[in-house]
Image (cartoon, helix red, strand yellow):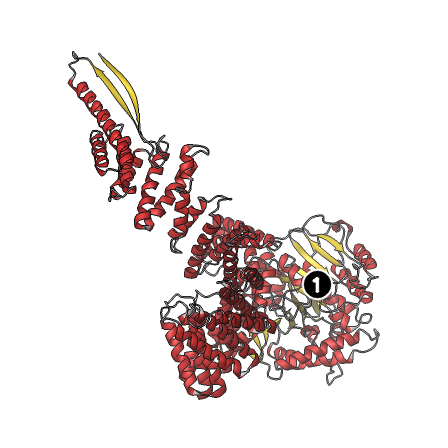
Amino acid sequence: MEMNHSANLSFPAVRGVQPSITLKVAVVHACDDQNGALFDSLVDCGIARHTDVGYARLAKYVRSRMVSDLNDAVKHFQLVLDQCPVGHPDRATALTNLAWVLLKGYIQKDVQDIDTTTSLFRDTLALRPQHHPDHPLSLYNLTEALTWRHLRKSTAADICEAAQLYHELLPLCTEGTYLRSIAAGGNGVDYVIEECNNLPTDGSDEGIHLRRVVLELCPLGHRLRPRTLNELARAVEARFDQHGSIDDLDTSIQLRREAVSLCPEGHTDRDTYLNNLALSLISRYKHQGNPNDLDEAISLYEQALHLYPVGHDSRDCSLDNLGSALVDRFNERGDIDDMTRAISLYREALTLCPPGHPRRDTTLNNLALALQTRYDKSRVREYLNEAIDRYRESLRLKRFDDPGHHLTLSNLSSALCSRFMETRENDDVEEAIALGQESLAALSSLHPDRWFSYRWLQQAYLSRYRILHDPADLSLAMENFRLASRHPPQGFPYRIRTARRWVAAAETHSHTSALEAYNTYFDLLDGHLATRSSTISRREAAAAFNGVRSLPVDAASCAIRNHNLRHAVELAEQGRGQQWSLASRLRTPVEDLESTNPTLAHNYLELSKLVSNAAQSSATITDSATADRAAIEYRMLIRQWEAAVAKIRDLWGFSRFLLPPLYADMQAAARQGPVIVLIASQYSCNAIIVPTSGDPHHVPLPSVPLADLSNLKDRFARAIRNASALGTKVPRNDLIVLLRTVWDEIMLPIVNVLQHDLKLKYSFTSIPLHAAHPFRTNSDGSREKCLEDLYICSYTPTLSALVRSRQMMKKRVTPSFVTIGQGQPGAGKGKALKAVDSELELVHKLVPATATHIMERDIPHAEFAFLSACHTAVGDEETPDEVIHLAAGLQFSGFKNVIGTLWQVDDSVAKHVVKAFYETMFKDLKDGDVMDCTKAAWALNRATHAVKTTVPLEQRMVFVHIGFFVFTLRTTLRGWIFEKIEIESAIKKTNGEHKIGTTFSNYHGTMPKRALKHLKNLGGYAERNTKRTKLKREEKEGKENIPIHGWISQRSNRKASCLGH
């Protein structure tokens, strides 16, 4: 007969933990002859006996610190473990008891071997997996062994593993329990956090993951959270330095913002976190060029400086930091007060760093840089000479392995180049080149600061070339321009400015790399603008670069001068309207893609919506921290969107999806007739004819330099202003002279080349090319034909827009109509417009009743907008992308046809044009009929012709059509006039750059049979039997067409009528 009993044996607490073992006691009767059961019982009795002895020896060791007692305890616990082989239910407990005895001896320095102890605890943990009731205790035991080994051996891997174990342990420890109290105490997880925070910064993915684990050990309110946030920020920023992902820099700034917020006024570490946040903001400013980051950094540095009064050990560092930021702002805005203050701060810092001070070399370098920058603006030689002396002293104090040694080398190189250009002392430029090469050799291939070395080497070689004219120096300068522009670890703003300087140098010295420089510039600018999430922020980013406005036409001119007309068309297309292009990439028609791969098309459209929504929402954010988070989320969506686009480009036939179009792609715009691209550059003015097939043709305009065009623009502005004061019947002689000049110098050379089928797209802004007129008579007394006699004019932004717009004509539905007007301005915003109400009533009468109703929601498929307000088709000349104006914005948002205005509209006469327009637009339209908005350009042409006697010239020229271009057939055949106006394309949510452009199209002359067949295929035409005399009379009378183009952003109170469906 056998009786089983359980007995719990407990031990004194070791480091706050109560070890215990549960043993089974068996009572065996003498008559029991089951040998196996007897053996098991004897083993259990041995476990109990050895455990008792081990417990007694351990208790004695704790009291006496006799090593012999410790050894006896270890021997008996080892015997217990030996009797608990693998698979024994008490093996985990036996492992724990032995490990704790060894750890106790290690703590008292009586045991040297900690590795065995750690292995025993690992074996225990393996026997107690997740969900085991003793799993938390085993986790804690292992952390104790690891932390003690780290304490003695400073093994980084041990403290990192301990952090991972605590990350798993703490959620398993309920608040208020004993295990939670010892694990979360100062000797537990807090020690691990502090030691992890003391580890070297590791920007690898593994290092950042560890930092995030440690941060999760510091909940809100934890005393170590600010320091832990700072260490994670440092690791993330280190990864940014290695790989250049702006998301990492944004994340670092977010983390540093939280650290500052957790350290209010009076906190001992507030100064550190203020400086660190400012430093990260400066870094982002240098990579993205947002001046708000720079201003905030200066504000933070000033707050930190207030925490370092005179006599504080760190005041010199704070003075240096603030001075550096002020120099950056001086370079950004040119405010001499910033530079004066920066130099003053550096001089104060230098007094705090006398000879022998460890930071004197840094302050010397910074002061020298400020003095050199001051010289660059003032050209006062004393500043430059002092800067060179300070650089040399700084170099003497710096060790060769100093992290800033290469920067001082580069800076001195730059200063010597500047002095060489003044003194022509060859020793200066030779030393500058040697220093630049030395600084470059000291850096790895992906170090961001290689950009500085390339930059100053380029300057040195170019400086020497300008004096000695050695072609080898020019080649070396251009090569260093190339390397600096294409050095990815450096931020976009620096590289964009380098590419701009490369362009200027290559053009100045007629170097063959000029076209490559232009291409590099556009690629970098596109990449930079793509990081901005709103149209406004993209405009601000582009405007930060001087000269960006002229680059597209200069690039096209360069290609022309290099006899590469195809590339000239591509550059003109790519360079203009980059902001519209970036936004429109999210609105590309995907009908072809949907038929090829519906899944990819759906994914692309959904991601495009998400990106667009994120961009729109970000525009309303004012809080800096929220804006940083939104920027990170936006770029995450952009990466997903780009991945979707990459998959689409892998499909056959979609390799150019959303990429800048090639010449062959854009030539489709000339399918119905040639397209003319006019390019007004500082280097030359030209026209390029894009024919229906084959290579483009060049029409030089040597008699029209850019300066003359600028003068012509100003003269037009004055003539229009003067004409507004004249009576309706008074001839506009000034305008007539100017329009004759436009005809003779610009349009006639093109018309002479193009006998017919003209479609015109131009970049000559602020000059009404569409109104060009010879104002002369022929020898037979007839009036010489002008442009308006030959063509109906309409504007379109780009060649790509013409190609894509045809796709938008595939889906048409019945339109609806809405008119909007405002006659009374807001307070202080202009005079009242008395004709608005009567004009609205006029429109109401002319539009069929069944087609008129007010839309109370957004119009998803906009067709037509008539913007009769002032300056609605004119943008700001200083804007890098000149096509950004109200009419272009409506067109981009979905309106296929927009009528806008180039300058101020006379309220009293505009209604005559509006009346004539709608009478023509809705002529013969009955109730219930569908309005044909494709007639808008033709209707405007007819309207301005109809009011010639009642509306002065400048008020007829003011209205322009943007969107669809008009394809007009007018010819005679056997006494018949066949007239058909067919809109061939529209501009809807365009996916390309928006430029001001004009398209004219016409068939004029005798119609052959094939033309008649084509005309019939177009679908419907009007036939009128008439006499040739009538035809001649119509041709003699002619018709007056209107200018198109221009822009200025001015608000007006005139009405707008919009048509959509």
Q: Quadrant of the N terminus?
A: top left
Tell me where residue 848 appears, x and y as whole percent: 77, 53
Q: Which residue is mark 1?
A: 899
Question: Which residue does the image show at 35% across and 34% down from the upper left?
Answer: 17
Say whether residue 939 is left or right of residue 174: right
Count the numbered circles shown. 1
Say whether residue 24 is left or right of residue 423: left
Figure quadrant of residue 969: bottom right
Q: Examine the rendering and report whether any part of residue 264 can be seen.
A: yes
Tell me where residue 42 appears, x and y as whole percent: 19, 22
Query: In the image shown, does 954 or 82 lie closer to the viewer?
Result: 82
Amino acid type of disc 1?
Ile
Q: Examine the rendering and report whether any part of residue 802 can be seen.
A: no
Q: Is residue 836 above or below residue 218?
A: below
Question: Which residue does the image show at 52% across and 55% down from the upper left?
Answer: 270
Query: In the image shown, does 303 or 847 lie closer to the viewer?
Result: 303
Figure quadrant of residue 582: bottom right
Figure quadrant of residue 1007: bottom right
In the orientation shown, which residue stands out farthest toward the front? Answer: 64
